[in-house]
């Protein structure tokens, strides 16, 4: 069966698209980690980040930058970002269409953000130098 037919991201409504360029789309995450959480996806079905070609990778970074600026311009409480892509089931990927998370962060939105994306494995988030 054609994966793009069963893929929810291949069927994204044009009404949900915030921005796009030649190979990528941006839209709000339906289950946001923080207010303003955006997903960047390729227009063509690609299973994960490592299947993107050079043009798609370049366009992904361009759209990430554009959406970051738009979020900053519209929300002065944003003080940082997390960017991430889950690649494979063991990494937590549940929709097997490449998607890059752009997650706005705000001072005080969690008790201790030190370690950031290392928190995907909670006991490894904090690191101490010996």
Image (spheres, grey):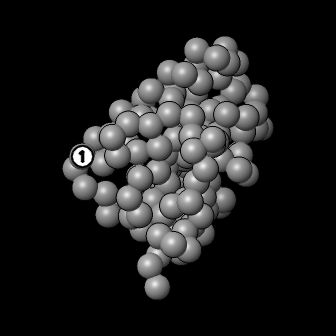
Q: Residue 89 vs residue 119: left or right? A: left
Q: Position of residue 120 (x, y in %)?
A: 60, 58
Q: Which residue, as the protein is rendered here, is positioned at the far front?
A: 14
| Residue 97 or residue 17, whichever sits in front | 17
Q: Residue furthest bottom?
A: 1
Query: Measuring 51% from the left and 61% from the top, which residue is drawn there?
Result: 10
Query: Looking at the image, is 1 positioned above or below residue 115?
Result: below
For residue 19, say whether it is visible.
yes
Q: Using the image as rendered, state which of residue 89 and residue 128 is in the foreground.
A: 89
Residue ranking furthest to the left: 54
Image quadrant assignment for residue 95 = bottom right
Tell me the quarter of the picture where residue 18 sits. Answer: top right
State the count of labels.
1
User: Mark 1 = which residue?
Assistant: 55
Closer to us: 127 or 45: 45
Q: Quadrant of residue 62?
A: top left
**Residue at 50% over, 34% down:** 19
- Residue 77's x, y, as percent? 70, 18
Q: Residues within 10 Å of mark 1 (few under 14, many from 20)?
A: few
Q: Position of residue 11 (x, y in %)?
A: 56, 60
Residue sitting at 59 percent across and 24 percent down? 71
> Residue, x 62% and y 33% (percent of image)?
104
SS for callout 1: helix
Q: Is residue 5 above or below residue 77?
A: below
- Decide: is 119 above or below 107: below
**Residue 74's x, y, as percent?**
64, 17
């Amino acid at each position: 069966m054609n994966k793009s037919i069963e893929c929810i991201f291949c069927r994204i409504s044009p009404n949900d698209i915030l921005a796009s360029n030649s190979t990528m789309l941006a839209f709000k995450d339906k289950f946001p980690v923080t207010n303003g959480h955006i997903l960047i996806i390729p227009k063509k079905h690609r299973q994960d980040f490592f299947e993107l070609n050079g043009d798609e990778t370049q366009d992904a970074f361009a759209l990430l930058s554009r959406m970051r600026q738009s979020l900053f311009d519209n929300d002065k409480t944003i003080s940082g970002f997390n960017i991430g892509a889950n690649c494979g089931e063991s990494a937590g990927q549940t929709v097997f269409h490449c998607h890059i998370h752009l997650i706005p962060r705000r001072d005080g939105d969690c008790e201790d953000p030190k370690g950031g994306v290392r928190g995907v494995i909670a006991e490894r988030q904090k690191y101490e130098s010996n």
